Image (cartoon, helix red, strand yellow):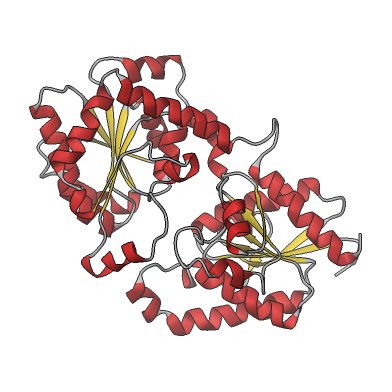
Amino acid sequence: MSRYGLRIALIAGEHSGDQLGFKLMQALRAAAPVPVDFVGVGGERMEAEGLHSHFPLADIAVMGFAPVIRKLPTLLRRIRAAASAVIAAEPDALVIIDSPDFTHRVAKLVRRARPKLPIIDYVSPSVWAWRQGRAKRMRAYTDHVLALLPFEPEAHRRLGGPACTYVGHPLIERLDELRPDGAEQARRAGPGPVVLVLPGSRRSEIRRLSADFGAALGLLAKEGHAFEPVLPAVPHLIDEIRSHVARWPVQPRIVEGEAAKLSAFREARVALAASGTVTLELALAGVPTVVAYRVAPFETWLKYVIKVPSIVLPNLILGHNAVPEFIQHDCTPERLAAALAPLLGEGEVRAAQVAAFAKLAGLMRLEAGEMPSGRAAAIVLALAGRTRGT
């Protein structure tokens, strides 16, 4: 490759990484003073930006213990192949994107072969929640962490991890899509309000939470609350979702697609949601929420190793439990309905969540005009330039 250009290696492991990766590629091209080309592994969005992925993401994007075991030989081969491709390409920097079980193994192999190559981790592993020793171990193969959550730099400092900078969560680039306009705000405040129902984006979550969510809605209706339940469905699980909600005492309106989901978020007055990134979307949309979660019986050991006071992202960012959460045996229709009821009307309980969400948006905000991908690109370029002596 000509030394008048810049070569960046990118390794993503699943769809969410592909989304971050293509925006980073765009930001790198916009900010770099020289042409940039890319090598590595990514999905459709990254390939559309010019990355020739060494193999499809479907080969490695697996979740759960059993699927990982079944694909273990393929995963090990792909780890070695990805590392070899990066080493052979002689890039100016390597960016690993999320999926630590895959991307960190690639980074370790690359570090052994190219000890001076800057390695940047885009999305911190949850070292603040469990396996905290990972933070210190990351220093052997990671030069900088690009954090999506504002409390993560302090967590890495406390745990002895690599240098870490908050670059912003991609959701803050979408605030205009999440916030209601005048008509949507009127719908949010009007009679018969929308109650969002979000039982999860995985089959296991829907299976474990669906009955309790449906029964909670039934209790609210029985108590005389008038509302319209709306369930934004993950397209590939639509049939399973319909099968479950057919047994609910109150039938929700099921909507499909990102545009319909965002429209429902902008109109909703309250939400009942499974724990996950969706709770952050709801908080930034200003929708007071009740969160629930169940794990399989054999996973209950996690409560002994998770080191955080909440599993709800907005609570962790705020530093206090503004959003009520009901986990495992506490997740009952009665408790969910009792927590939702005061959020439907006006009062201190609802006002407290709305105020907390306004504070959260401030904590996550970047400087005027800054975007997460742009801030991330600046750090990558600085480290890549340091390697080349520029």
Residue 279 in the image, given as x and y percentages of width and height: 39, 42
In this picture, residue 158 sits left or right of residue 327 = right
Question: In the rendered image of this protein, does residue 9 appear above or below residue 255?
Answer: below
Quadrant position of the N terminus in the picture: bottom right
Front-most of residues 231 and 360: 360
Q: Is residue 56 visible?
A: no
Residue 193 place in picture, x, y as percent: 27, 22
Residue in view at x 38 percent, y 34 percent? 260
Residue 265 coordinates in the image, percent (x, y) = 38, 31
Residue depicted at 58% across the width and 45% down the height? 150
Q: Which of the 4 image quarters holds residue 249?
A: top left
Compared to 318, does 147 lie above or below?
A: below
Q: Is residue 2 left or right of residue 108?
A: right
Residue extending farthest to the front is 158
User: Which quarter of the rendering shows the C terminus?
Assistant: bottom right
Report the front residue among 346 and 177: 346
Whether residue 76 is situated above or below residue 94 in the rendered picture: below
Name the residue nearer the viewer: 360 or 230.
360
Total marks drawn? 0
Residue 75 screen position, x and y as percent: 49, 79
Left or right placement of residue 335 versus residue 76 in this view: left
Q: Is residue 132 visible?
A: yes
Q: Residue at x 18, y 53 (%)?
A: 329
